[in-house]
C-alpha cells in the first residue's frame, strides 16, 4: 500500500455507520483502509494528529455557483474549489447558470476537466433543466447524464411553466436524477428586491412575499404526487415552505430540501442601511422564518445545509440596492455558522454532519458522506473550538461578497483530505498551493 | 440645540428636538424671501451641486433658489446632462463631483437608499431630494412647517394621508416625522397600496370619507399615472371615483381642516380643482415654505461641514442658530 495516512487521536463522527467516538482512521490508496480504536493503527506512512478535533466525512456542498465558464472574473473552478477545501468541503455540485449554460454534454465535460486540473475538491456538475435556462424546452438531460451530471436545475431562473416542470420530473426519473428547484413565482415576486414585510415597507424597497416561494412549492409537490421522480427544493426560506415540505414528506413523496447558512442565521433586518451583501434570492426573511427553518432542520424536514455560494465582483455589489446582484459567497463561512446554529438549537453534531455530507451524497448519488472501510478517503478534520474572525480579504474565493465580515466565529476545518490527499491545512497556508497529484 | 448630522438622508432617525430645530431654523429664514433684495451672503463662496436622476422641476428649482438666496454657487446636473447616459455609475459620477470639492450634493434618484449609498462612500454632505419609494425629507419638512404655521402645533393633530402610500417617499418622510412629533396619522388608499404592515404606523382605511372624518390635516399624494396597468387599480378614472378629494369629503373633516398636496397635482384625479383652489388649501404656502426649508437645510449642513473639516470644536449654539437679525446685519 502506498500513500498511507493515519489520522489519530480524533473523535470520529460517521452518521452512516452510527460511529461517534474516539477512533483512528487509516487511509491507503485513496480509500479508508481501517477504522480502529485509538492507538491501534499501523505506524506506517504519514500521520495527522487530530487530538481535540472531529474527524468527519468530507463536507459536500450541493449548491455552488462556480461561474466558469463565462464569469471567470467572479470565480473559477480553481478558486471556487480552493474556497471549498478551505471551508472543509471535499466535494461540491455546481449550478448550470454559466455562460454558455451547462445545458449540454460539452459544457459538462469542460467543467469536469477544469476540476481535474485544479485537483482540489471533487466537482459534480448539475445540468440545466431547460435549454439556455429559458424554461421552454427540456435540455439534453440524458446526454449530460452520460457526461456526468448529478442532478438537473434551472437554479436562478424559477420554472414558471408548470407543464415543463411536470415533464422534467417525469423525464429525469429515467436517470434517477433529482430536479433541484428554485421556488419563486416570478409574477408574485415581480420586481421585488427583498422580503416583503415591515422592513421593506420602511426602507421603501419592493418586496418579495413569502407566498411567491410557497405557491411554487405547492405546485411542484402537487405535480410530484402524479409524476414520480425526485424533487429537491433549493434554499428553502419561509415558514410556510417548511410546512409544505413536512406535509409532503408525511405523505411519502420523494421530496427533499436544503437551507443555506444565511437563511438560518440572518433576517431581513440585515438589509437595513441598504446593505447589498444582504441582498439574495430568495431574500432573507423574518425571525419567524429563521425559527421555522431551524425547526425544520431539527425535525428532519430539511435534510441538507447548502451554501448557494454566489460569488460576485465588487462592482456588482457596490451599487444602489435595486441594481445590486443577488447572493453571497458561502463556502468559507458555512461550517462555523452551521456549528453555531446547531449549538443554539441543540442539533446533535451527527445530524449536522449528515446535513452537510451524508445526506447531500445520498441525494446526488455521489461517493463520500461516509467513512467505512472501502469508502473514498474524503475526510474533513474540524477543530470545533477554534475561534477566529471572518475576514473577507483572506478568502480563497475570488469574490468577497459576504455579510459576515468581522464576525467572531468558532469552529474551523483544519485539514481537508480528498481521495487520501491533504488538499488544505488551515495552519499552513503556503503549503496549500501544492495540489493533490494527478 | 444644534444639528449634528453630516447629511440629511431622511427624517426617520431624527429626534423631536432635531426636527423642531430644523423647522425653527426654516421659519427664521422665511423673512429673507419677503425682502426687496432676496439675498444674504451666508453661503458666499460655497458650491452646491444638484444631481437629479429623475425628472423634477419644483424640487430642483426650489433648491436652486434656496442656494442662490444664500449666495452659494449652484450647479445643476440631471441624468441627461451627466455621464449617466454614457454608462457611468452613480458612484463614479458622485466621486468625480466630490473631487471638485462642492460643499453639498443634492441627490434625487429612483433607487431607494441611493443617497445613503453615496453618504457612506464620498466625503461631502448629501441632501436627499427624494430616493425611490423611501424618503423625501425636505418635502416633509416643508409640509410640517406649513401645518405648524397654520395650526400652531403638530402634537395631537390628526393627519389623514391619502393615495399611493406604498410607493410614496413623501408619505414615509411625513409619517416618520409626524409620529416623532406626536401627531396621529391615518393612511387612506386602495388595499393594493396599503400593505398590512402599515398598521404599525397608523390606522388604515380604504374609505376616503371615513379616513378624513374630523381630520385636522388632509395630505393628498400625487398619483403616479404609470402605476396604471400594473393592477394596483384598474384605471385612473376608477381610482378618482373612490379617492379624489372632493368638497363633499372635505365637509366631513374638521371645520378648520387644511389641505396639502406636494405637487404636481393631477386635477380631477386625486384632488378636485375646487378643493385645490379653495379656502382650505395651503398648497401655495407649501411651495413658499419649500424655499425656507431648503435654505435651512443647506445652511446647517454646509456650515457644519465647514466646522467639521477645519477640525475646530463644534460651533457654539449661538453660531449655528441663524437668527434673522444676524443674517439681516450681514446682508446689510
Image (spheres, coloured by chain):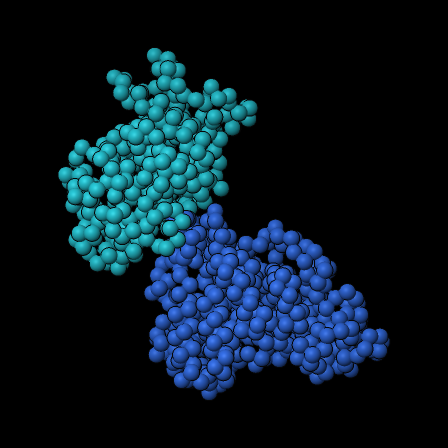
Who's the residue at 32% across and 53% down the image? B194
Of all residues, the one furthest to the left in this rendering is B274
Q: B144 or A72: nearer the eye?
A: B144
Asked if B154 appears above or below A303 in the picture, the reply is above
Residue B209 on image: x %, y %: 22, 47
Q: Is residue B278 visible?
A: yes
> Chain A shown in which color?
blue
Q: Is residue A30 visible?
A: no
Image quarter of residue A79: bottom right
Report the side of B16 relative to B236 (left or right): right
Depth check: give the residue in front, A335 or B148: B148
> Residue B185 in the image: x percent, y percent?
34, 43
Identify which residue is drawn at 72% across, 63% down.
A383
Q: Is residue A81 left or right of residue B3?
A: right
B324 is higher (above) or lower (below) than B200: above
Q: Position of residue B322 (x, y in %)?
A: 41, 21
Please state the horizontal and vertical placement of residue A431, each as a whole percent of the image.
Answer: 72, 62
Looking at the image, residue B49 sits to the left or right of residue A1; the answer is left
Q: Quadrant of the N terminus of chain A?
A: bottom right
Query: What residue is at 48 percent from the left and 22 percent from the top?
Result: B317
Quadrant of residue A419 within the rendered picture? bottom right
In the figure, A220 relative to B8: above or below? below
Residue occupying image coordinates x 26% and y 40%: B214
Q: How many marks?
A: 0
For the residue pair A406 and A202, the one nearer the viewer reads as A202
Q: Is residue A288 above or below residue A35?
A: above
According to the colouring, which chain is cyan? Answer: B
Q: Nearer the viewer, residue B156 or A193?
A: B156
Where is the C terminus of chain A found, in terms of image quarters? bottom right
Left or right: B41 with respect to A342?
left
Amino acid at each position: 500500500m502506498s500513500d498511507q495516512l493515519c489520522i489519530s487521536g480524533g473523535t470520529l463522527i460517521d452518521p452512516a455507520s452510527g460511529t461517534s467516538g474516539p477512533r483512528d482512521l487509516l487511509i491507503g490508496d485513496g480509500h479508508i483502509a481501517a477504522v480502529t480504536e485509538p492507538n491501534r493503527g499501523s505506524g506506517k506512512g504519514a500521520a495527522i494528529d487530530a487530538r481535540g478535533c472531529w474527524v468527519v466525512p468530507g463536507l459536500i456542498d450541493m449548491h455552488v455557483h462556480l461561474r466558469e465558464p463565462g464569469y471567470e472574473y467572479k470565480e473559477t473552478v480553481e478558486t471556487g474549489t480552493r474556497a471549498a477545501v478551505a471551508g472543509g468541503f471535499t466535494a461540491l455540485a455546481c449550478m448550470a447558470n454559466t455562460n454558455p449554460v451547462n445545458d449540454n454534454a460539452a459544457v459538462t465535460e469542460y467543467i469536469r476537466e477544469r476540476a481535474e486540473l485544479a485537483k482540489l475538491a471533487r466537482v459534480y456538475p448539475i445540468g440545466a433543466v431547460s435549454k439556455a435556462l429559458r424554461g421552454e424546452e427540456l435540455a439534453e438531460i440524458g446526454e449530460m447524464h452520460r457526461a456526468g451530471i448529478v442532478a438537473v436545475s434551472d437554479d436562478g431562473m424559477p420554472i414558471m411553466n408548470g407543464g415543463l416542470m411536470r415533464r422534467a420530473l417525469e423525464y429525469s426519473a429515467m436517470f434517477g436524477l433529482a430536479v433541484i428547484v428554485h421556488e419563486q413565482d416570478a409574477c408574485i415576486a415581480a420586481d421585488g428586491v427583498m422580503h416583503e414585510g415591515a422592513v421593506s415597507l420602511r426602507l421603501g424597497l419592493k418586496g418579495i412575499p413569502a407566498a411567491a416561494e410557497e405557491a411554487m412549492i405547492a405546485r411542484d409537490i402537487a405535480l410530484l404526487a402524479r409524476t414520480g421522480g425526485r424533487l429537491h427544493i433549493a434554499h428553502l426560506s419561509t415558514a410556510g415552505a417548511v410546512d409544505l415540505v413536512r406535509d409532503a414528506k408525511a405523505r411519502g413523496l420523494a421530496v427533499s430540501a436544503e437551507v443555506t447558512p444565511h437563511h438560518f442565521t440572518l433576517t431581513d433586518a440585515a438589509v437595513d442601511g441598504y446593505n447589498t451583501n444582504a441582498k439574495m434570492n430568495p431574500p432573507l426573511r423574518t425571525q419567524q422564518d429563521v425559527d421555522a427553518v431551524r425547526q425544520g432542520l431539527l425535525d428532519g424536514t430539511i435534510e441538507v445545509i447548502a451554501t448557494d455560494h454566489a460569488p460576485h465582483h465588487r462592482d456588482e455589489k457596490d451599487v444602489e440596492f435595486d441594481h445590486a446582484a443577488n447572493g453571497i459567497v458561502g463556502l468559507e463561512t458555512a461550517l462555523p455558522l452551521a456549528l453555531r446554529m446547531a449549538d443554539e438549537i441543540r442539533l446533535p453534531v451527527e445530524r449536522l454532519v449528515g446535513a452537510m455530507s451524508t445526506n447531500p451524497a445520498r441525494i446526488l448519488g455521489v461517493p463520500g458522506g461516509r467513512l467505512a472501510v472501502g469508502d473514498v478517503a474524503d475526510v474533513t478534520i474540524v477543530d470545533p473550538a477554534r475561534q477566529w474572525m471572518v475576514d473577507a480579504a483572506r478568502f480563497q474565493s475570488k469574490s468577497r461578497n459576504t455579510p459576515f465580515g468581522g464576525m467572531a466565529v468558532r469552529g474551523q476545518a483544519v485539514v481537508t483530505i480528498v481521495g487520501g490527499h491533504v488538499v488544505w491545512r488551515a495552519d499552513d497556508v503556503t503549503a496549500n498551493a501544492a495540489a493533490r497529484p494527478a | 440645540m444644534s444639528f449634528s448630522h453630516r447629511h440629511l438622508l431622511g427624517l426617520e432617525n431624527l429626534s423631536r428636538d432635531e426636527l423642531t430645530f430644523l423647522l425653527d431654523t426654516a421659519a427664521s429664514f422665511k423673512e429673507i424671501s419677503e425682502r426687496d433684495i432676496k439675498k444674504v451672503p451666508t453661503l458666499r463662496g460655497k458650491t452646491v451641486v444638484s444631481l437629479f436622476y429623475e425628472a423634477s422641476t419644483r424640487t430642483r428649482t426650489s433648491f436652486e433658489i434656496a442656494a442662490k438666496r444664500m449666495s452659494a454657487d449652484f450647479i445643476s446636473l440631471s441624468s441627461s446632462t451627466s455621464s449617466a447616459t454614457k454608462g457611468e455609475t452613480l458612484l463614479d459620477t458622485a466621486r468625480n463631483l466630490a473631487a471638485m470639492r462642492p460643499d453639498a450634493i443634492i441627490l434625487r434618484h429612483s433607487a431607494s437608499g441611493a443617497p445613503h449609498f453615496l453618504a457612506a462612500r464620498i466625503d461631502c454632505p448629501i441632501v436627499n431630494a427624494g430616493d425611490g419609494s423611501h424618503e423625501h425629507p425636505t418635502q416633509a419638512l416643508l409640509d410640517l412647517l406649513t401645518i405648524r404655521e397654520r395650526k400652531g402645533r403638530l402634537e395631537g393633530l390628526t393627519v389623514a394621508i391619502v393615495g399611493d402610500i406604498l410607493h410614496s417617499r413623501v408619505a414615509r418622510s411625513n409619517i416618520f416625522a409626524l409620529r416623532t412629533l406626536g401627531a396621529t396619522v391615518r393612511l387612506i388608499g386602495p388595499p393594493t397600496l396599503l400593505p398590512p404592515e402599515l398598521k404599525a404606523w397608523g390606522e388604515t382605511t380604504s374609505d376616503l370619507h371615513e379616513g378624513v372624518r374630523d381630520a385636522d390635516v388632509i395630505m393628498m399624494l400625487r398619483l403616479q399615472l404609470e402605476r396604471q396597468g400594473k393592477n394596483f387599480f384598474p384605471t385612473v378614472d376608477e381610482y378618482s371615483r373612490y379617492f379624489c378629494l372632493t368638497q363633499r369629503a372635505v365637509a366631513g373633516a374638521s371645520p378648520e381642516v387644511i389641505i396639502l398636496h406636494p405637487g404636481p397635482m393631477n386635477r380631477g384625479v386625486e384632488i378636485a380643482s375646487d378643493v385645490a383652489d379653495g379656502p382650505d388649501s395651503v398648497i401655495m404656502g407649501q411651495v413658499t415654505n419649500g424655499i425656507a426649508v431648503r435654505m435651512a437645510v443647506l445652511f446647517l449642513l454646509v456650515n457644519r461641514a465647514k466646522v467639521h473639516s477645519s477640525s475646530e470644536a463644534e460651533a457654539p449654539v449661538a453660531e449655528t442658530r441663524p437668527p434673522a437679525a444676524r443674517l439681516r446685519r450681514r446682508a446689510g
